[in-house]
Image (spheres, rainbow, N blue to C red):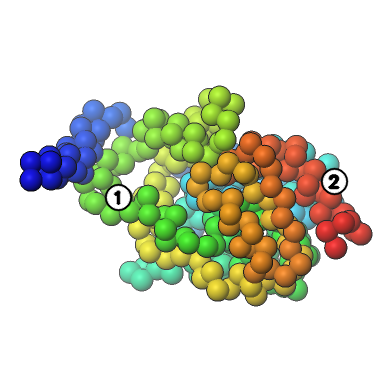
Amino acid sequence: MNKKLGFIAIVLVTIFLVPLTFFLLQPDMIISKEQAKKELSSPASHFIKWRNAEVHYTDEGSGFPVLMIHGFGGSYTNFNELAALMKDQYRVVRIDLPGFGLSDFPEVNENENYQQDYRDYISFILDTLHLDSVYVIGNSMGGAATWMTAIDHPDKVRKIVLLDPAGYDSEKIAGNLMMFKFKSVRQMFNKGMPMFMSREGARRTFFKDDSIPESFILRNNRFTNRDGNIAHMLNLATSNQFPDESLIGKVTRPTLIIWGSGDEIIPVEHAERFHKAIKGSTVEIIDQCGHCPMIEEPVKTRDIIEKFFEPGNRYH
């Protein structure tokens, strides 16, 4: 009985006292949208309106268009290295999903359907940027957006690349985020995401912890703390809305699946599940790599992708 009471006490302290301590002692790390735009945009940045919200994308290079979609908590900069390696041969468009990076999320309704919102947003991007024939690359949550885009627009999407994509067991994978349902825990983030949490998130993302650039951690922390972003992340994390995995088998476009062997967020075993569901798909596993191959192993990732894009390659 004493052990049980002790455990309950620890839980109560974690839920109430620890967040309160952070709330009282943490400096305000929220940055304004204008400051974020000045600090975190690119020379290739563009800002347009979608549903009365300002959204951001970059457009650079020339050649056949390639659309790149980041994951939960990410931004267009997650593809910095891959875009730099590919823009000499391709027109590279990187988007910030609404509520992330430098993109606002529109006004939220009581029964907001986030899954449909993101599908509508990608459709808007394809139409607005005249991406009538395009390759699409997506990572994690952006991977889910990618395979859904292939289903929604088989006439426009030529090929897709899924980098450690979301899709299977999403509720289980998101289980670690359920702590944010507690109001006291959410209050901890009123002043922004603490740096130590951004650093821990990077450690989970990378396989080789000693290779994480400090600049990567600092930049991601700044994006997360852009005014409005963290509130949207908390709303999305606790929405209990997940991709419909039964749809994955409806993908008909040529598909390349790339996975980091040491992914701590979505298990590498999911690669085979996608492979079985998507007819004719190909799987490539990158050894000693984590959840974001395009960040941790950009050259290897580029080489695999460009072989897949080449006409008459061995993937056909």
Where disc 2 sits, the SS reads: loop
> At which x and y percent is residue 190?
29, 42
- Residue drawn 40% across and 30% down? 195
Name the foreground residue: 2 vs 217.
2
Extreme left residue here?
1
Where disc 1 sits, the SS reads: helix
- Badge 2 amino acid: Gln
Q: Quadrant of the C terminus?
A: bottom right
Among numbered discs 1 and 2, the one appearing first in the sequence: 2
Q: Residue 90, relative to residue 126: is it above or below?
A: above
> At which x and y percent is residue 41?
59, 39
Packing grade of label 1 (10 A; few <14, some 14-19, many >=20) is: some
Q: Is residue 277 left or right of residue 102?
A: right
> At which x and y percent is residue 253?
74, 68
Does residue 225 appear in this view? Answer: yes
Q: Which residue is mark 2?
A: 89
Q: Is residue 282 left or right of residue 102?
A: right
> At which x and y percent is residue 2?
8, 41
Q: Quadrant of the N terminus?
A: top left
Q: Is residue 130 left or right of residue 38?
A: right
- Residue drawn 42% across and 65% down? 241
- Residue drawn 77% across and 49% down? 305
Q: Quadrant of residue 152?
A: bottom right
Packing grade of label 2 (10 A; few <14, some 14-19, many >=20) is: few
Q: Which residue is mark 1?
A: 179
Q: Nearer the viewer, mark 1 or mark 2?
A: 1
Q: Residue 304, relative to residue 198: is it above or below?
A: below
Name the foreground residue: 48 vs 133.
133
Q: Residue 150, relative to residue 28: is it above or below?
A: below
Q: Quadrant of residue 143?
A: bottom right
Alpha-carbon span between mark 1 and mark 2? 44 Å
- Badge 1 amino acid: Met
